[in-house]
Image (cartoon, rainbow, N blue to C red):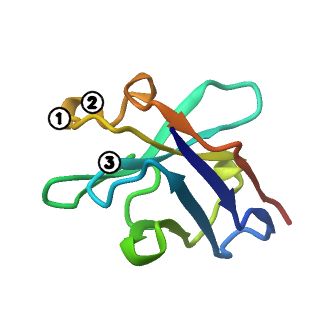
Amino acid sequence: QVQLVESGGGLVQPGGSLRLSCVASGRTSSTSTMGWFRRAPGKGREFVTALRYPGATTYYADSVRGRFTISRDGSKNTMYLQMNSLKPEDTAVYFCATTLSRLITSQVRDASDYNYWGQGTQVTVSS
């Protein structure tokens, strides 16, 4: 089993920044694919970004590319999501996720291919 705990959410003004963290424990691996998804009010779960191994390839949704950055500190079993130039439409609950399976490129954006999820952290972008 893998446990994931997110933190770092909050209220920020448009144009501001936040950094989310996701700490993994349990049966973790430094080469597990990890990702961030979000769910806005009244909408389904949406892919945001992922870091896939081998190769540490990054993937971003078009809506966040150039503004968000995913990273990972293997020594701390922690994944980060740096969010800059935030917009009101970024308001959502953000979830980190991982899987013990090796994903191919076509799978990294599909929430159903991730086995473990955090509880989520709320990000609200509003003036």
Q: In terms of image quadrants, where is residue 75?
A: bottom left
Estimate the x, y position of residue 71 in percent, counting from the top left: 39, 69
Of 110 and 72, nearer the camera is: 72
Q: Is residue 84 above or below residue 43?
A: below
Of 127 and 34, nearer the camera is: 34
Of 93 and 32, nearer the camera is: 32
Q: Name which residue lies at 82% across and 60% down.
A: 126
Q: Is residue 3 above or below residue 43?
A: below
| Quarter of the image with the C terminus in it | bottom right
Q: Which residue is mark 1?
A: 104
Q: Tag 2: residue type?
A: Gln
Q: CA distance from mark 3 to mark 2?
A: 10 Å
Q: CA distance from mark 1 to mark 2?
A: 5 Å
Find out whether the residues at labels 1 and 2 contact each other: C-beta distance under 8 Å. yes
Lateral position of residue 119 relative to residue 52, left or right: right
Question: Going from the N terminus, do you reach mark 3 or mark 2 first?
Answer: 3
Q: Name which residue lies at 76% across and 33% down.
A: 41
Q: Name which residue lies at 58% across and 46% down.
A: 3
Q: Tag 3: residue type?
A: Thr
Q: In this figure, what is the number of numbered marks?
A: 3
Mark 3 or 2: in front is 3
Q: Which residue is mark 2?
A: 107
Where disc 1 sits, the SS reads: loop
Tell me the tag on residue 33.
Answer: 3
Find out whether the residues at labels 3 and 2 contact each other: C-beta distance under 8 Å. no
Q: Residues within 10 Å of mark 3 (few under 14, many from 20)?
A: many
Residue furthest out toward the left: 55
